[in-house]
Amino acid sequence: MTSPPARLAAAASNVVAKVLRGGVADLRPVPRVLIDQGPNRSVYRMTGSGGPAPAGPPVLLVPPLAAPALCFDLRRGCSLAEHLVDGGRRTYLVDYGNVAFSDRRLGVEHWIDEVLPRAIRKVSADAGGQRVHVVAWCLGGIFSLLTTADQPDLPVESVTTIASPFDFTAIPLVAPFRPLIDLTGGHLLTPVYRALGGAPSYLVGPVFRATGLNKEITKPLAILKNLDDRDFLAQIEAVDHFMANMLAYPGRTFGQLYHRFFRANDLAEGSVDLGGRVISLSGVKVPTLVVAGENDTIAPRRAVERLVDLLENAPEVRFESAPGGHLGVLTGRRARGTTWRYLDEFLDAQFSRTAGA
């Protein structure tokens, strides 16, 4: 156990770093090179920090809409991208960039017909034609599976979804609003998001914070109690940096998410209707890892675990739960020994299976 004088010295050092150097977190991104670019799509190959060039099958990191792609690269020492690259994996990232008011007519189809298929094909080509292992968070997992189901010819070898909800009735946060939404025929939010062209970033950030309101309220006290813990303070800073960079939802996409996912709860039955075009998750025929956060209020375990029963044609479906909330399960301090370990085990098994085929 650290002695009181040592703790006091550590706390003083951390305070000096926060006041004079702007903080204790190392927010430098993992080095990368741009390999492809198009509308709402920048694809990067992560190059690491000068070590041996990563090799083997490619891993593509897919973020959700509205959240910055730095969710996979939160800070040094707590970055999934860094972990994968340091582990020798050939790692890629797709970044959607900023969503403007001019993007308001883009629907879910844009992401599953254009953005993700093009990114997957480019990553495969860059890796010498190898098939791609997709690792996605939140809505990125939903879009990745819909893309894989709808386009079975894509070079996808496996999919990992982290904190991706598929049964929206299992989300306690939305339950109180359902009676009001049903009473208005689902039109409670329609005029609002149409007028705004979607869900603007200045609303998305506060809503995301509100899901962890208790932590926001107690955060000042937690910081005071942990002034000697540099890793704890660095994580707080990194999450604040992430929250300050939240993005917008395009209007039409937000409308589809609201009406098809939230109101109709289409995904819980295994398919989604996009203007008469039905995409069924039964079309997913690749191994899939599903990870839920044990303290996630946005995508609780039951909402995430529903996916396991929907992937009836996947040759392998593995479900795991790990400590952490919606972001924490992906890149919290405990994710290093849980979520990331599950992912490593899953990818190693897939790599071995492919090599032995």
Image (spheres, helix red, strand yellow):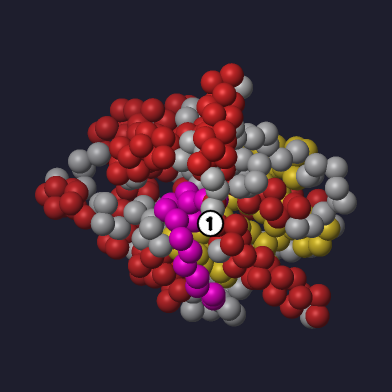
**Residue placed under numbered mark 1 in the picture:** 334
Q: Residue at x 61, y 73 (%)?
A: 287
- Please give left or right for residue 136 compared with residue 210 in the image: right
Measured as percent of width and height from the top left, residue 265 is found at 31, 60
- Please give left or right for residue 193 compared with residue 27 in the image: left
The residue nearer to you, when weighing 224 against 211, is 224
Measured as percent of width and height from the top left, residue 134 is found at 63, 59
The secondary structure type at the circle numbered 1 is: helix
How many C-alpha atoms fall within 10 Å of the one at disc 1: few (<14), some, or many (≥20)? some
Measured as percent of width and height from the top left, residue 231 is found at 57, 43
Q: Quadrant of the C terminus?
A: bottom right
Q: Residue at x 80, y 42 (%)?
A: 49
Picture quadrant of residue 48: top right
Q: Is residue 38 visible?
A: no
Measured as percent of width and height from the top left, residue 256 is found at 37, 48
Q: Is residue 328 visible?
A: yes
Picture quadrant of residue 304: bottom left
Q: Residue at x 39, y 70 (%)?
A: 306
Q: 59 above or below 21?
A: below
Q: Amino acid at mark 1?
A: Arg
Q: Which residues are magenta?
A: 317-332
Q: Residue at x 26, y 52 (%)?
A: 173
Residue 55 in magenta stretch = no
Q: 135 above or below 230?
A: below
